[in-house]
């Protein structure tokens, strides 16, 4: 499939332009920073893309303002009193020092206990907490991947969890592998299922074409509602490198 990608500037706004063999032009604004992307048919000129962007500039600005207004977590120190999210719920953290091995315990619907060795620094506390996040993520993701692979009648793909700065999930079709963003463990459970279904549909359709949307509509009719809920959730602090 022939795909061309480059950037143009429209009224001071940087726009990613991707040309591919599709029938219609599609314009999107994506979290967390309001990146603007236009998918256009191969024959559509840059001037036509500029006109489409200018025509929808008011909508683009409203979308970007909405992302800017989202609540954003500050940098985490993993100390008592902090708020942390788990499965779409907000919890208050209590730091408990003196245990031999680090662990996290969900005490009730509002409280998380972080057990660490006495004198553990921030890096050690974070390591324990993110390790818990990762284990919880893997235990919830695997049965969902099995469920959707079976539903789509495809072999169980290889998969992994890592921290990603701009994507909820990615798919490598050639390697038959998907990656899931660790941040999904903070979101409502339906969000994780949506991302898994979305990435597995890419095994049938590489790009976000009309066929891709039709396949996802058939498999998960409410996916737009879940996607909107996912993008409305609080965003994480951004000063991590996304390396996993």
Image (spheres, helix red, strand yellow):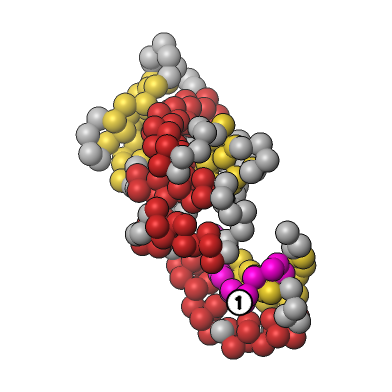
* Residue lying farthest to the front in this orientation: 153
In this rendering, does residue 90 appear at all? no
In the picture of the structure, the residue carrying the numbered disc 1 is 24
Q: Is residue 24 magenta?
A: yes
**Between 62 and 80, the one nearer to me in the picture:** 62
Secondary element at image label 1: loop
Give percent across and percent down for residue 131. 48, 27
In this rendering, does residue 152 appear at all? yes
Q: Quadrant of residue 104?
A: top left
Q: Residues within 10 Å of mark 1 (few under 14, many from 20)?
A: few
Q: Residue at 38% of width from left, 15% of height from top?
A: 98
Q: Residue at 34% of width from left, 59% of height from top?
A: 222
Give percent across and percent down for residue 209. 57, 64
- Relative to 88, say whether 42 is above or below: below
Give percent across and percent down for residue 217. 41, 60
Q: Quadrant of residue 176?
A: top right
* Residue lying farthest to the left in this orientation: 108
Query: Left of 94 or right of it: where is 65?
Result: right
**Between 89 and 115, the one nearer to me in the picture:** 89
Q: Residue at 64% of width from left, 43% of height from top?
A: 172
Q: Quadrant of the C terminus?
A: top right
**Between 163 and 139, the one nearer to me in the picture:** 139
Q: Residue at 51% of width from left, 45% of height from top?
A: 200
Q: Is residue 204 magenta?
A: no
Q: How many marks?
A: 1
- Relative to 134, say whether 54 is above or below: below
Give percent across and percent down for residue 160. 55, 33
Magenta-tinted stretch: 17-34
Q: Quadrant of the N terminus?
A: bottom right
């Amino acid at each position: 499939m022939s795909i061309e990608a480059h950037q143009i500037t429209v009224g001071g706004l940087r726009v990613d332009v991707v040309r591919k063999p599709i029938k219609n032009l599609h314009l999107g604004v994506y979290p967390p920073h309001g990146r603007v992307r236009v998918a256009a048919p191969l024959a559509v000129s840059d001037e036509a893309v500029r006109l489409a962007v200018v025509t929808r500039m008011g909508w683009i600005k409203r979308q970007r303002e909405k992302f800017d207004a989202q609540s954003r977590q500050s940098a985490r120190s993993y100390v008592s009193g902090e708020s942390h999210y788990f499965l779409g719920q907000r919890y208050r953290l209590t730091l408990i020092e003196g245990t031999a091995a680090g662990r996290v315990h969900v005490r009730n619907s509002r409280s998380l206990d972080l057990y660490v060795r006495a004198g553990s620094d921030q890096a050690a506390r974070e390591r324990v907490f993110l390790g818990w996040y990762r284990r919880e993520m893997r235990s919830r993701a695997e049965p969902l991947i099995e469920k959707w692979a079976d539903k789509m009648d495809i072999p169980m793909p290889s998969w992994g969890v890592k921290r990603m700065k701009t994507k909820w999930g990615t798919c490598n079709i050639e390697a038959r592998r998907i990656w899931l963003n660790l941040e999904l463990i903070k979101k409502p459970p339906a969000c994780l299922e949506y991302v898994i279904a979305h990435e597995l549909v890419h095994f049938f359709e590489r790009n976000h074409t009309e066929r891709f949307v039709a396949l996802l509509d058939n498999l998960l009719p409410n996916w737009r509602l879940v996607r909107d809920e996912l993008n409305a959730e609080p965003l994480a602090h951004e000063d991590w490198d996304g390396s996993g």
